[in-house]
Image (cartoon, rainbow, N blue to C red):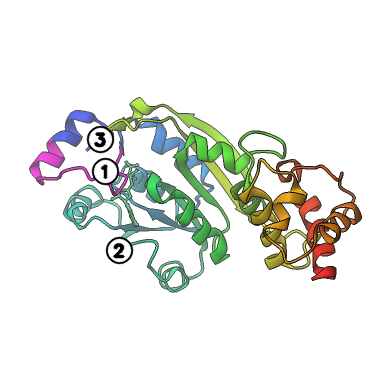
């Protein structure tokens, strides 16, 4: 069966009495090049175990099963389980795990499902939980690569450089944890139902924490402080985030080698690291 053929999909869903759920971010792929290209970009190979989040009716799952040693696909919507039983019947290396990716014990899942394999993630994510899912995946430190389709706007934020309009605390968080690449865009017409926005595929390749950061908690406190009030100068934004006087904060900014009137949106990881070191000395 062609899992991207719209008439076959409609017939399959009707036979199972399935109705799309907006709250579960259900937009299914209907163009076969999309799951093929996402799977190819994921780095899946015989030595890898791929965690897929939200297989839907399984178009990406089938492509991943052709490439990977093992695929574990976590699906929250129980109504999709009988459908997946049918569409994945010829994929012996796929296990469907009913559940919520935000609640599963990812470490236990990886240990059980992927012994001897390199774990990675590949998914067309439910867009309403993009940020918390990516945070959970990157924080886990379990995966060698995370390749996901998300809203283009979020993809641009993740990959944004300092000083650009899309740059913010989430760009810094992702780039602290991983090398981020925006691979390609996917138009709305490739989905059923069509979402309101264009999508894009990003690949995050986790890496060790940057050596310039000595105190991760303080680093992210400075990042959050700067971006909570991004229209303000760094000095004014930090004064709401740290129990230091304006004079002390100005001294930190200057000792970090930054201009007195700089805004946080201009700073990259090395600059926030230098700032956090100075703040740490005065706190
Ligand atoms: N992979 C399919 C495709 O590309 O056609 C479906 C992708 S659809 C954008 C997102 C999928 O994630 C849906 O199947 C939805 O039921 C599932 N989902 C939503 N929230 C979830 C969660 N918290 N945990 C696991 N799956 C979830």
Residue beneath the point at 45% across and 49% down: 130
Mark 3 is surrounded, within 10 Å at the Cα level, by few (under 14), some (14 to 19) or many (20 or more) other residues, namely few
* Camera-nearest residue between 114 and 6: 6
Q: Secondary structure at mark 1?
A: loop
Report x, y in % for residue 25: 32, 45
Mark 2 or 1, closer to the camera: 1
**Quadrant of the rendered image containing residue 151:** top left
169 versus 8 height, above or below:
below
- Label at residue 2: 3
Judge left or right: residue 243 versus residue 149.
Answer: right
Q: Secondary structure at mark 3?
A: loop
Count the marks. 3
Report x, y in % for residue 12: 14, 40
User: Residue 268, can we see it?
Assistant: no
Q: Which residue is mark 2?
A: 99
Mark 1 or 3, closer to the camera: 1
Q: Secondary structure at mark 2?
A: loop
* Camera-nearest residue between 134 and 186: 134
Judge left or right: residue 270 versus residue 4.
Answer: right
Q: Is mark 3 within 8 Å of ligand 1?
A: no
Q: Is mark 2 within 8 Å of ligand 1?
A: yes
Whether the magenta-drawn stretch holds residue 25 is answered as yes
- Label at residue 22: 1
Report x, y in % for residue 234: 75, 48
Report x, y in % for residue 45: 50, 51
Q: Earlier in the sequence, mark 1 or mark 3?
A: 3
- Magenta span of residues: 11-27
31 versus 264 height, above or below:
above
Q: The C terminus lies in which quarter of the figure?
A: bottom right
């Amino acid at each position: 069966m062609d899992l991207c053929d719209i008439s076959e999909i409609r017939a399959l869903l009707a036979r199972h009495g399935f109705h799309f759920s907006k709250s579960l971010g259900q937009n299914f792929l209907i163009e076969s090049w999309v799951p093929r290209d996402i799977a190819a970009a994921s780095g899946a190979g015989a030595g890898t175990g791929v965690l897929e989040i939200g297989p839907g009716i399984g178009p990406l799952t089938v492509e991943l099963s052709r490439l990977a040693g093992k695929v574990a696909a976590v699906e929250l919507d129980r109504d999709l389980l009988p459908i997946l039983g049918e569409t994945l019947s010829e994929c012996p290396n796929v296990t469907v795990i009913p559940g919520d990716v935000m609640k599963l014990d990812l470490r236990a899942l990886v240990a059980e499902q992927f012994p001897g394999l390199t774990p990675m993630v590949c998914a067309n994510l439910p867009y309403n939980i993009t940020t918390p899912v990516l945070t959970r995946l990157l924080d886990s430190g379990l995966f060698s690569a995370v390749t996901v389709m998300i809203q283009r706007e979020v993809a641009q934020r993740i990959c944004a450089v300092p000083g650009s309009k899309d740059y913010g605390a989430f760009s810094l968080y992702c780039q602290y944890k991983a090398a981020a690449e925006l691979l390609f865009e996917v138009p709305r017409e490739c989905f059923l139902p069509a979402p309101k926005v264009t999508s894009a595929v990003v690949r995050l390749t986790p890496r060790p924490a940057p050596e310039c950061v000595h105190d991760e908690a303080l680093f992210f406190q400075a990042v959050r402080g700067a971006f909570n009030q991004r229209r303000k100068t760094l000095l004014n934004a930090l004064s709401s985030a740290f129990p230091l006087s304006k004079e002390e904060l100005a001294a930190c900014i200057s000792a970090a080698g930054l201009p007195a009137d700089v805004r946080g949106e201009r700073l990259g990881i090395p600059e926030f690291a230098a700032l956090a070191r100075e703040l740490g000395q005065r706190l």
